[in-house]
Image (cartoon, helix red, strand yellow):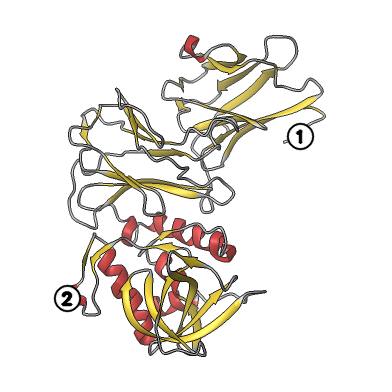
């Protein structure tokens, strides 16, 4: 039965017909890891195999490379990914088809190509198979964009099924097993105004015991990662915020020290991933949402606004029968965005006021300040939207000549 299901899974992943781009054929000569191989490309005038990096997927890293499986070494999930890719290629008798929208696409010194293998006489997308089976993360692409939406959806489907890399206990029993640790990522300008990058990753705990995070690590969909130093503690019912930029660690704020933007904005999207020391993926946030796009707070918060006069404000009222925690949510009045922090919980029936002007240093639990030096709401008509960082709308307020 398992073999039948695997065949069905492969057949569902037929390679879509490309409207443009270029195709090559070749023979695989060796295997580097779960996302890189060497291919002798037919018709290139040489017998030298080229290193090819699969478009749109990111397998876990190997440390020892070999065509002999027993000699390979690497992080948890890495050897499984290499073995599965090798199996697919060997079943295709090492004959593969490569595709690129742009022939010059590369990753460092490797060619960047979509890879197809022959299954039961039909070409199938190997990258899609790897994602569906949970052997890799989705890696967003700027140039080879054809796979982005499809691959992001496949990765989110695999995550919901907790297969492969998405199984939080695959690598064995880890520290604080079973403790939920929600992750929120604020990418580039998505969670703040256009002139304030402010990228960060926040880890929360709703457990009544502290969670030691020394040796745990956060990564993006690429190779950038931050390892929490020894002695890092996530307090009971607390939060830690890892800022991407530079700064001095203090209290619940830590700094990655990366001098470039890390997480990609929607509509492209990205993800932040939290691994424990043995390599289990314990928590994550991917965005934008492409599968099962619901939120527990949809219809739980009602927006209203005071748009005239010098005291512009937006009110958020919890109209549900349960508590609402707005950490991980934002208000958007294009082009402006306001991000709620960890002190933004509403009991049933409670209301929070966000004053457009005024200093955030004067914030209380139920009165926040956007910090603007001028009015931003248009008297003739405007839109204010409350949404999650995954792009799911909780409520939208439109007035005047505007519409949601």
Rounded to the nearest angstrom, the CA distance separating label 1 from label 2 is 61 Å
Residue 134 lies, with reference to residue 24, above or below; the image says above
For the question of whether residue 301 can be seen, the reply is yes
For the question of whether residue 1 can be seen, the reply is no
Q: Residue at x 21, y 48 (%)?
A: 277
Q: Is residue 228 left or right of residue 355?
A: left
Report the residue marked by disc 2.
Answer: 70
The percent position of residue 193, horizontal first and vertical second, equals 59, 30
The percent position of residue 128, horizontal first and vertical second, equals 46, 69
Counting residues from the start of the chain, the first of labels 1 and 2 encountered is: 2
Q: Quadrant of residue 80?
A: bottom left
Mark 2 residue element: helix
Q: Quadrant of the N terminus?
A: bottom left
Q: Residue at x 62, y 13 (%)?
A: 357
Q: Which mark is residue 403?
A: 1
Q: Residue at x 53, y 83 (%)?
A: 24
Q: Which mark is residue 333?
A: none
Q: Quadrant of residue 236?
A: top left
């Amino acid at each position: 039965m398992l073999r039948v299901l695997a065949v069905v899974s492969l057949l569902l992943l037929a390679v879509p017909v490309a409207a443009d781009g270029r195709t090559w054929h070749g023979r695989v000569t060796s295997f580097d890891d779960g996302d890189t191989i060497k291919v002798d490309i037919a018709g290139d005038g040489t017998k030298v195999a080229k290193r090819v990096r699969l478009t749109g997927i990111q397998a876990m890293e190997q440390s020892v490379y070999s065509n002999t499986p027993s000699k390979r070494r690497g992080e948890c999930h890495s050897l499984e990914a290499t073995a599965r890719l090798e199996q697919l290629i060997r079943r295709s008798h090492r004959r593969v088809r490569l595709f690129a929208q742009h022939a010059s696409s590369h990753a460092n010194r490797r060619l960047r190509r979509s890879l197809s293998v022959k299954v039961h006489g039909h070409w199938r997308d190997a990258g899609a198979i790897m994602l569906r089976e949970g052997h890799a993360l989705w890696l967003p692409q700027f140039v080879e964009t054809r796979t982005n939406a499809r691959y992001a959806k496949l990765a989110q489907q695999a995550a919901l099924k907790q297969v492969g890399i998405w199984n939080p206990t695959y690598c064995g029993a880890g520290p604080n097993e079973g403790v939920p640790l929600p992750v929120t990522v604020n990418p580039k300008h998505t969670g703040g105004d256009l002139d304030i990058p402010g990228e960060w990753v926040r880890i929360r705990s709703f457990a009544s015991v502290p969670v030691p995070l020394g040796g745990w690590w956060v990564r993006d969909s690429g190779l950038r990662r931050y390892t929490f130093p020894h002695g890092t503690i996530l307090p009971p019912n607390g939060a830690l915020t890892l800022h991407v930029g530079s700064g001095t660690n203090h209290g619940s704020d830590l700094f990655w020290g990366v001098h470039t933007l890390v997480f990609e904005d929607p509509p492209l999207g990205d993800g932040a991933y939290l691994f424990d020391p043995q390599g289990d993926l314990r928590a994550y946030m991917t965005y934008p949402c492409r599968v099962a796009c619901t939120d527990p707070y949809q219809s739980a918060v009602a927006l209203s606004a005071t748009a005239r006069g010098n005291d512009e404000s937006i009110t958020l009222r919890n109209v549900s029968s349960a508590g609402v925690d707005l950490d991980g949510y934002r208000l958007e009045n294009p082009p402006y965005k306001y991000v709620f922090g960890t002190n933004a919980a509403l009991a049933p029936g409670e209301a929070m006021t966000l004053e457009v002007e005024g200093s955030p240093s004067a914030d209380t639990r139920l009165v926040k300040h956007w910090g603007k030096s001028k009015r931003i709401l248009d008297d003739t008509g405007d839109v204010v939207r409350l949404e999650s960082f995954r792009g799911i709308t909780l409520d939208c307020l439109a007035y005047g000549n505007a519409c949601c």
